Image: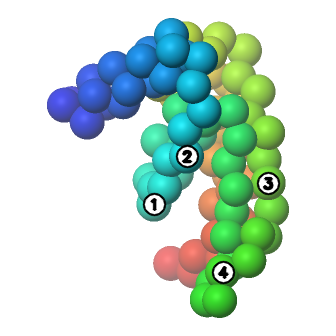
Amino acid sequence: MTRLSLSDDVYQIIKNEGKTAILVTHDLSEAISMSDRVVVLSKRPATVKKVYDIHLTDKSTPIQNRKCKEFNFYYDQIWRDLDVHL
């Protein structure tokens, strides 16, 4: 809960200040909900595998962004690009 709340705070600060930030994360939900663009890297040596421009209908806060109908589409597409076999 604290992490989600902190994500909302960081997101608002970046937007209010009009700044660009690079978020490095292994949390796919966090990446989609906080970003305008997600870059998927390959295994070592890392190269850019794919770039997703994130377009959510109601881009207000990371917590709300996770409820957007497009969120699951991006999650599924990016998950496939990660080549994670569970």
Q: Identity of the amino acid at label 3?
A: Val
> Would you identify the image quadrant in which residue 33 lies?
top right
Q: Identity of the amino acid at label 2?
A: Ile
> Would residue 2 appear left or right of 43 to someone viewing this image?
left
| Whether residue 1 is situated above or below residue 65 in the rendered picture | below
Task: Kindly state the secondary structure of the residue where label 2 is placed.
Answer: loop
> Would you identify the image quadrant in which residue 41 lies?
bottom right
* Sequence-first tag of 2 and 3: 2
Q: CA distance from mark 2 to mark 3?
A: 14 Å
**Residue 85: mark:** none
Looking at the rendered image, the quarter that the N terminus falls into is top left
Residue at horizontal 45 percent and vertical 56 percent from the top? 25
Give the x, y percent position of residue 84. 58, 76
Residue where numbered disc 1 is placed? 26
* Sequence-first tag of 2 and 4: 2
* Sequence-first tag of 3 and 4: 4
- Nearest to the eye among marks 2 and 3: give it: 2
Residue at horizontal 70 percent and vertical 56 percent from the top? 39
Q: CA distance from mark 2 to mark 1?
A: 13 Å
Q: CA distance from mark 2 to mark 4?
A: 16 Å
Q: Identity of the amino acid at label 4?
A: Ala
Give the x, y percent position of residue 38. 68, 48
> Would residue 2 appear left or right of 11 to someone viewing this image?
left
**Residue 22: mark:** 2
In the depicted view, which residue is nearer to us: 78 or 42? Answer: 42
Residue where numbered disc 4 is placed? 46
Task: Kindly state the secondary structure of the residue where label 1 is placed.
Answer: loop
Residue at horizontal 80 percent and vertical 62 percent from the top? 50
- Nearest to the eye among marks 2 and 4: give it: 2
Give the x, y percent position of residue 75. 63, 47
- Nearest to the eye among marks 2 and 1: give it: 2
